[in-house]
Image (spheres, rainbow, N blue to C red):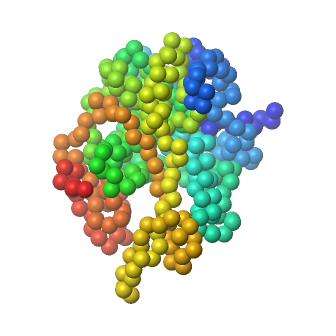
Amino acid sequence: MPALKNQHFVPRCHLRPFTLDGENLAINLFNFARRRAVLNAPVKNQCSADYFYGKDLHYEKKMQVIEGLYGAAITRICGSGYALTGDDLELFRAFWVLQHLRTEAASRAFAALSAEVVDTTGAPEEFRTSIAQTVQVVMSAVPEMVSVVEDLKVCLLRNRTAVDFITSDDPAIHTNRWYLRPGNERLGAPGLAKSGALCLIPLTPRHFFIAYDGDVYSLPVSNHWVDVRKESDVNMLNQQQLLNAVANVYFRETSDVTSIGRQFDATADRRIPCRHRLNHAILDWEDGVTKRYRVCTAEEARNHQDAIFHSETLYPRPSGWPDFIHWRASAATYSNGTGIGFVRRAHAETRTTSSQPFKKIRLDRINF
């Protein structure tokens, strides 16, 4: 096999701590389609495809550098007496972005959306994007996306319970507790710049990365660490993996097979079959200055002269959240009353071209 042909969209350096004895050879997994565990599965066959990032190896070689730094950082945090450094925190933040964008799930979602746009709007066929093309587009967006989340506060979790963290084939999760609260449906989709963002990824069965909006949440952080002492909190974080994974979750201890199967059964109804929705609207009324559109079906939009559409990312709703993620007293967001919605302070300050000024608003004063 040519060098670098088998390319992982979840790298082996991430899976290593979850492998048997940390040897990076075999790993336990729970497969959703078969609803059963597979023990001692070869790691080299997990989360990979031939030339996933392209045959020119441009991105594959770049990621090998980042993965080497990440693997070294994981070794350090597992050592005794390690003091978390700012450089490692920023490395984990950048790795989260890379992993969030690089998975097969992310590329397939983008490709499916482009296909739906072509099929439902009559757009030119060149707008249809293949998986291979999508990977290149998505990977080129990594630097920009790192800048989007650099205002988030960052900490690591130490697992002090008897329950391990698990990982999956799509482990870097973006969610939003505030946007997903019952009654907040009118907020729309919680993009990465929106208030209340949470970025999650397990690092080892005993360590976890979290980036969060410090204007909305408060965590009991001490020197960039939070000690997790409730098994229910670990289970809530593991549920995020069960909700977002495409096909498999991965775990280290064989004794966890029964509990993971039970958790999957309890979570299955909360999983969503598709991560995006394409919304269509056609011109309903205009007075020469203002236009009003009404939501319609794809068929109506396709046959109408003046139609618009927009894509919406869908997020699964967990059954609960870790108790250590508290609402901040006087939690706040920023809005200018337009369709931009409720964004974090850093993103309000950078939107200098907006015609409407942004104002700070307390969350408890927003009525829907």
The image quarter containing residue 81 is: top left
The image quarter containing residue 355 is: bottom left
Q: Residue at x 48, y 61 (%)?
A: 279
Q: How far across and how far down the image is residue 45, in percent?
A: 69, 28
Q: How far across and how far down the image is residue 264, in percent?
A: 48, 27
**Closer to the camera, 361 or 12?**
361
Left or right, 100 with respect to 51, comes to: left
Q: How far across and how far down the image is residue 315, in percent?
A: 44, 45
Q: Residue at x 43, y 28 (%)?
A: 266
**Closer to the camera, 39 or 298?**
298
**Closer to the camera, 56 or 242?**
242
Q: Residue at x 29, y 70 (%)?
A: 356
**Closer to the camera, 3 or 290?**
290
Left or right, 69 with respect to 115, comes to: left
The image quarter containing residue 4 is: top right
Quadrant of the drawing holding the C terminus:
bottom left
Left or right, 287 with respect to 37, comes to: left
Single out the residue that lies furthest toward the bottom.
Answer: 288
Quadrant of the drawing holding the N terminus:
top right
Q: Is residue 39 above or below residue 200?
A: above
